[in-house]
Amino acid sequence: MVTRSPLKLAVLVSGNGSNLQAIIDAIESGAINAKITCVVSNKSDAFALTRAIKHNIPTAIHKNQDYPTRREYDAALVKILRDHGAELVILAGFMRILSEVMVNAFPHAIINIHPALLPAFPGLHAQKQALDYGVRYSGCTVHLVDCGTDTGPIIIQAVVPIEQNDTEETLSARIQQEEHRCFPETIRLFAEGKIQVNGRHVQISP
Ligand code: GRF
């Protein structure tokens, strides 16, 4: 049996960090052979930073306003991530679009989670978009990141039925339960070398 070394993860955040927590928990329970080498936030008050510090994970604050252009921001971000040896970059509620500087630096190695069944309802307020449209099912999507808004190849999706009395809050809470399952599962597949990308199609080995 070949033993792989733990996959080195960088997690980018802007807010609460419940997905970061799900990933930390999955690693600590031994479900994923990975190590988070840094958590980077573009917001200094993100609660995700507190979660990382509690688990002794190195953190960095990388503020939007410190860089005049998206490309310059991303070039400095690439340096931080490379300095920490990142092999897979995880956008866990990171509220920024990446430029080609970041996307090209980590080919097929940046993933995002979105709270809808893409390609439906990309962008902000996906849960509200789904409720306003009147769909019966929404869910979450883990996908590879390209330079568009939630447009990269899809890796995993989970369906969440919409209930008659759902509000944005109740639907978001049920979608998050699925996110906390799907994101660690996707990382496990990467860590086990089971993901292959052919154009828009992601093959998952059994
Ligand atoms: C999640 O709902 C995710 O789908 C979206 O941002 C939210 C982040 O939540 N991309 P958290 O910070 O992980 O709690």
Image: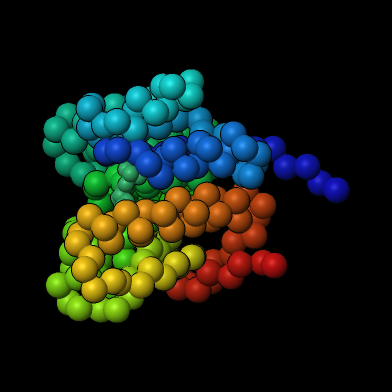
* Residue 123 visible in the current orientation: no
In terms of depth relative to the viewer, which is nearer, 71 or 88? 88
Q: How many labels does the image show?
A: 0
Query: Is the residue 194 above or below the residue 89 in the image?
Result: below
What's the residue at 28%, 61% (across, down)? Answer: 171
Tell me what residue is drawn at x 53 percent, y 37 percent. Answer: 25
Q: In this view, does 41 lie to the left or right of 10?
A: left
Residue 33, position in %: x, y? 65, 41
At x 41%, y 70%, the residue is 159
Residue 22 point in image, percent of width and height:
47, 43
The image position of residue 186, as x and y in percent, is 53, 56
Q: Is residue 82 above or below residue 146?
A: above
Q: Find the residue positioned furthest to the front.
A: 165
Taking the image as drawn, is residue 177 in sight?
Answer: yes
Q: Which residue does the image show at 19% across and 62% down from the upper left?
A: 167
Location of residue 72 by image quarter: top left
Q: Which image quarter is the C terminus in?
A: bottom right
> Image height check: is 143 above or below 15?
below
- Relative placement, left or right, of 32 versus 86 is right
Q: Nearest the camera: 41 or 115?
A: 115
Specify whether 33 is left or right of 59: right
User: How are the residues colored?
Assistant: rainbow
Where residue 68 sits: x, y (%)?
A: 14, 36
194 to the left or right of 173: right
